[in-house]
Amino acid sequence: MNEKAFNGIGASPGVVIGRAYLLDRRKVVVAGQRIEEVKVKDEVARFKKAVEISKAQLEELKKRFSKGLGKSHAYILETLIMLLEDKMLVDGTVKRIKDLRVNAEGALKETIDAIGLKFDAIEDEYLRERKHDIEQVGERILRNLTGHKQESLADISDEAVIIAHDLAPTDTLMMRKDKILGFATDAGSRTSHTAILARSLGIPAAVGLERITGAVKTGDVVIVDGIHGVVIVDPDEETFLEYLKKQRRYKYFEQELEKLRLLPAVTLDGDVVHLEGNIELPEEVASVAEHGGTGIGLYRTEFLFLNRPDLPTEEQHYQACRHVAERASPQEVVIRTLDVGGDKIGFGGVSEKEANPALGLRAIRFLLQRKDVFKAQLRGILRASVHGNVKILFPMISGLAELREAKMVLEEVKNDLRTEDVPFDENVKVGIMIEIPSAAMISDLLAKEADFFSVGTNDLIQYTLAIDRANEHVAYLYEPLDPAVLRLLQRVSQAAHEARIPLAMCGEMAGDPLYASILLGMGFQHLSMNVASIPWVKKVVRSVRMEDAVELAALVMRQPTAAHARKTAETFMHDRFPDLMAEL
């Protein structure tokens, strides 16, 4: 036996041991071919028929799985169906067939590639991963165009660990939990819909392993550690027994976390902490409550803008925000205004590629230039505010002038609605994201004019340390416990508390149990995260005393390097949460 280990990304927690089933999910290889003018009409019809077949297949899947999954997961299929109706995808392909006189396969591939380039430039990792959905929908259309049948996971009759190059969300939906133990893929990330669905369904998974399919044969014994993103092929006896113990321990710990789901997030000495969810689509609200969350700390609105040739209307903003507000009521819903640039949403003459989009015309900067876009969104949000506990969040505020200008636009919209006798919450709270070092440095000034702060650590860390998280050469420098980052967080916390405004965090740091005690000790009362992290963070909150958290935060703040700070945090956690740390 020749043991081999592979390291990737932990996409869905859990440890599984079983026999591998190598699934062929290689992409259909197609070539663009020139066609004669007389064949253009037939080629367009052939493409549209493949789209309709694809739509019917997904509608059937939605019908079949909605009862068992519930609406909190069926939204993923709704998203894929919506993409099959997308004008940029469908009309763009038809236009290429007609203008370039190429076959449907070649035109579709070019269209998908062009849309993919728009998504590649998006800073937000979650939104960037929606490119994966476009590719999966395109692959389904291509298979229907070319007659390639796809093996169904629903047909697998024996227990197995699925090994594939990549998996679509529909693949995950077809997994029978009594047969599919877990999966591992060459491609993928934690923020793909496939990974999100795996976490929701409790299917352990590791992704981004790059070459796992080349190292595994059907029938091989494999171990998938979905916590750490490790896959071991043909383990020796010692490794096998070690992971068998880990598997049993994790299942026990999972059962213990489930007991906390309906319990409040309160420290041992009585301090209440609000654990909330980050969502992208209205249908995700239910999943937050299912995981024990109490409200929506970040509702991203970008998906209303992306991958469409026109702007979302005020009514579309209103309906989406109302849907979230009503479902979450009486819990709060923090709605973030548009957080990408005009070059990513393809309108308004801002189509040229910026040299450095992370530092360019995006978020509040773009909205203040295109106030028509800003006002339409604000009108929709304000109209929805009467249907629940809605708050507005402005992203990428860098200084006081931007905040004041944004608030002026909001007041103009409020006055217009009053004149039109359109109801809205007159007391709607307005907060800002602290994600730029300049905002953190003048947070004392901003706190006087904002109703609340929400710290976006993903960008704050990136901008503070001057690194690109997606660049493998410097990704190791992305460290939330870097002294510079911690000092900025402390400064923001002090400003918020002196101004007596709520302090929240909605970046990835908020969902990591290792940092939970530190953040409590620094004064963060609201932590918003991906829903799968809520039970883990709740475990820490309910097992720590606030006085100990304050002491830990002070101790971490005194450390000279990120490595020292991390060691301090890990020692604290190991002393108090040995079981939890064994699972992280």
Image (spheres, rainbow, N blue to C red):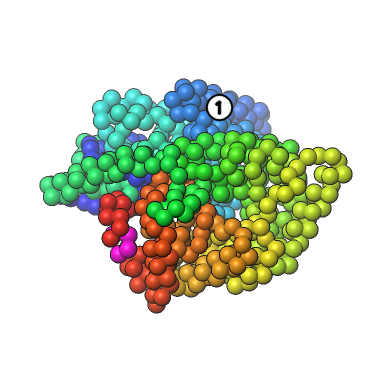
Image quarter of residue 251: top left
Which residue lies under the disc numbered 1? 55
Q: Residue furthest bottom?
A: 560
Secondary element under disc 1, as helix, strand or loop, is: helix
- Give, as a single range, the part of the protein colored magenta: 570-574
What is the x, y in percent for residue 416?
84, 47
Q: Residue furthest front?
A: 269
Q: Residue furthest right?
A: 419
Image quarter of residue 259: top left
Q: Classify 170 as above or below 522.
A: above
Image quarter of residue 431: bottom right
Q: Left or right? Give the position of 548 relative to 395.
A: left
Q: Is 24 colored magenta in this rendering?
A: no
Q: Residue at x 67, y 70 (%)?
A: 445
The one nearer the camera, 244 or 392, is 392
Q: Residue at x 64, y 43 (%)?
A: 389
What amino acid type is highlighted by mark number 1? Lys
